[in-house]
Every structure is written in C-alpha cells, then in structure tokens.
Amino acid sequence: MNVEKYQEILHEIPENVRLIAVSKLHPASEVEAAYALGQRDFGENWAQEMREKHEILPQDIRWHFIGHLQTNKIKYIIPYVHLIHSIDSFKLLQEVDRQAGKHGRMVGCLLQFHVATEETKSGFLMQECEQMLQSPEFSALKNVEIKGVMGMASFTDDTAQVRREFCTLHSFFTKLKTEYFSENPDFKELSMGMTSDYRIAIEEGSTMIRVGSAIFGARDYSKR
C-alpha cells in the first residue's frame, strides 16, 4: 500500500467527497493496512472475492460493490453489502430487492448510466431508466433504496471528453433528483472518478471516487 499517496488523496479531496478504496485483486492484508489508517469504505468487483474478504476482515467495513453484478451472485453479498454502485438493469434491481427481502434488509443502490464511448461499458440509457422509474413494478420494490447514480468515463487521454461525459452524468443525476427523487434526501450520491480521472470527476460534482491502483498498486489479473 502506498501510504503517502493515500494520505495525499485524502488531503486533496473535499469533505463532501467519499473515497472508496478499490481493493479488488489485492490481499486482505492490504485492506487491513488501509483500515489501520482509518479507511472504512472499500470497493470490490467480484462477489465471491468480496465475500471471502468480508468473512475475515473487521465487520465495520463498508463494502461497496462496483463491478458488473450477475444475478446469480447477488446472494453472496446481500447480507452485508453497504452500497451496490452498478445497477444497470431493472432485472438486476428486482433480484437485489428479492434477495434483500429474504434477509430483511434495505440495500442501497446506485443506477449505473452508460456515458462512455466504449460499448463494453454497461449502464442505463436515460429513456429506459425513466421507463423503469415510472413503472408500477418499480413502485412495488420494498427492499432497495436508490441513493444516486454511477458511471465511468471513456478510457482516454482526452480530458475534454472525460469532462463532457462526467458533465453528462451529473445532468442525469440532476434530472432524476428533480423529477423522481425530490422528496428523498438520501438520493444524493454521484459516484464517478477513478485513479486516472478522479480530479476531473470532483470538479464535475462527484461525491464518491473509486480509487484503487494509486493506493494499492498494480493488480495481477492472472489471479482471476
């Protein structure tokens, strides 16, 4: 763990921005090192890896699921997950609601929007999101709470493009807040920004940045 970089990030981000330390593919010992410095919010991309870490690490850690979530893996994280950032379909949201109901939990969720140029990135388009929010099936959900939105910018050196995409995501957040969640004070999170672009994301209104490699170093994807 790069303690100096971690403390540098904490020092530079505003008080209203929460740092999610992305610990995917890093050992539990690295999470413990960050925990010892006061970090409590950690992000994981894979349900089984998150479950394994949850079982052996301090129970007051707030686990954020930030990767693509398969419906058959939801059961692994529902008992303890703090926030699911990556709700990219109504089918997924319905299954989260169903599994959360089994455990008597209200699970916080963010709606993921597709704002990048890469087709590999998932997420709602605004029209389909509004159709979902206007549906009686959405109103019937009892065990999920929509806390805001999430998105990823294109992987590019073109900072102007990254800024435009974050600006678009912020406009989506504002539209939903105004038209669908104006009476819900908990709808307040705008999760955008990673190691390469979190400074731009903060300038464009992010309330949560998801930073991993700057804190924990490069990941070994051969472990997957």
Image: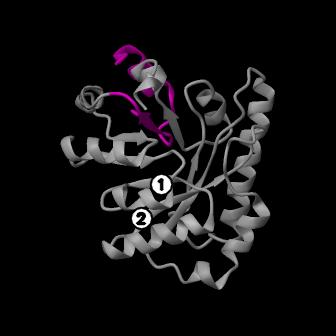
Q: Which residues are magenta?
A: 1-26
Q: Give yes or no for contact between labels 1 and 2 (Cβ–Cβ under 8 Å).
A: yes
Residue lying at 30% horizontally and 72% vertically, measured from the top left: 103
Give yes or no for residue 10 being in the magenta stretch: yes
Q: Position of residue 3 (x, y in %)?
A: 34, 17
- Circle 2 packing at 10 Å, graded few (<14), some (14-19), many (20+), is many
Question: Is disc 1 surrounded by few (<14), some (14 to 19) or many (20+) residues within 10 Å?
Answer: many
- Residue identified by numbered label 1: 84
Residue 21 versus residue 180: which sits nearer the camera?
21
Residue 124 x/y as whole percent: 70, 57
Name above or below for residue 7 compared with residue 163: above
Quarter of the figure that contains the N terminus = top left
| Amino acid of disc 1 | Ile
- Toward the viewer: 9 or 62? 62
Give the amino acid type for the residue marked by disc 2 in the picture: Val
Q: What is the number of the mark on residue 107?
A: 2
Q: Nearer the viewer, residue 17 or 157?
A: 157
Q: Which mark is residue 192?
A: none
Whether residue 221 is in magenta: the answer is no
The residue that appears at 72% across and 70% down in the rendered structure is 179
